[in-house]
Image (cartoon, helix red, strand yellow):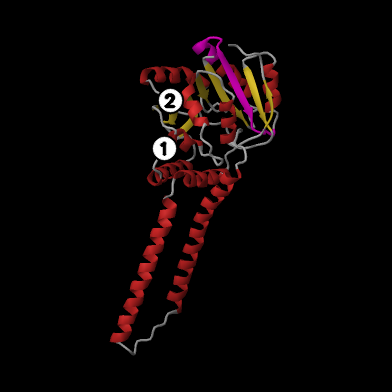
Amino acid sequence: MKLSIVSTLYRSAPFLEDFYQRVSSAARKTVGDDYEIILVNDGSPDHSLQIALQLQNVDSHLQIVDLSRNFGHHAAIVAGLENTRGEHVFLIDCDLEEQPEWLSLFVEKMHESKADVVYGVQLKRVSSPLSNFLGKAFWSSLNVMSNVRIPHNPMTCRLMTRQYVDSLLSIGDRVLYLAGVFAWAGFTQAPLPLTKTPRPKAHKSTYNLSRKLLQVADSFSSFSVAPLSLIFTTGLFIWLGSVLYGIYLLVQKLINPEMVLSGFTSVMLSLWFLGGTIILFIGILGLYVAKIFHEVKQRPLYIVRDIHKGIRHD
């Protein structure tokens, strides 16, 4: 099989049929009839699965992986990739912010660059100014602290060779941050600058603030030990500062025995500063301990309830 197309379903009912029609058309124009579309139902609470099953009744190219509950976007992507058979795999979100018609651009770029992976990069972010600023700060901070160069503003959509996908699936992380894993896997990777279509106001993103914060925590704990080094360095400077300040006070007392060492405000400020620093550092350590906790349990990334297979076209 020449091409596998993978997408995930979560509250996807409003745009699923349109996505299916457009991505099917793009696949036929690119590889003819030699393709499959794999949709992973990530415990969607709406009727996305029912729509997908109806579409499968009239199109045997469509395969549906139904997870037992919502395991998260990244786990659902892995579930989709593990069920592919194509020589090339096109991964794309189905919310139509990423255009199915881009497939031809990805294929052309892969032929030109001889790359193993062609990944989309946002030319211009379509979120609010505050979100854009925080996003830029996040990617800059992550790359400063990580020994793996992770591209700024990557999209989900990417075209990958079979060899790269198989290598990607060999990574055994239980706590996944896919943008980092995509980069860490190596191979020849080529960016393709594109502009997303803004999501209609009626279709709010399922990535709320709490999920974004959790993703930030996972990204730093997965691909950087810099926060741990920062804890040591900061603790060392605080310790040295306290020693030097203590020596200074002792010298002042020796020079002027009548000097009264007092100052409730300065003492309380020091206590608040040190107390806050300790709590912050314990929290950072907690992120890494939590990651160890999840990794050592070796639970599967996801559980499949059912796989709805159409007739394979080989």
Q: Residue at x 46, y 33 (%)?
A: 182
Q: Is residue 37 magenta?
A: yes
Between 283 and 101, which is closer to the camera in this rendering? 283
Q: Does the magenta stretch include residue 59?
A: no
Q: In this view, does 66 lie to the left or right of 145?
A: right
Crowd around label 1: few <14 · some 14–19 · many ≥20 (10 Å) = some
Question: Counting residues from the N terminus, which is met first, the one under dot 2 or under dot 1?
Answer: 2
Name the image quarter holding the N terminus: top right
Name the image quarter holding the C terminus: top right
How far across and down, in percent of the image, does residue 253 sit? 33, 85
Q: Residue at x 49, y 40 (%)?
A: 128
Q: In this view, does 14 lie to the left or right of 225?
A: right
Q: Residue 118 carries which label?
A: 2
Q: Which mark is residue 150?
A: 1
Question: In the current view of this chain or complex, which residue is farthest to the bottom?
Answer: 258
Secondary structure beneath label 2:
strand
How far across and down, in percent of the image, does residue 282 sit? 51, 59
Q: What residue type is labelled 2?
A: Val
Magenta-colored span: 25-45
Question: In the current view of this chain or complex, which residue is farthest to the left?
Answer: 255
- The answer to whether residue 41 is seen in the rendering is yes
Q: In this view, does 142 lie above or below 183?
A: below
Secondary structure beneath label 1:
loop
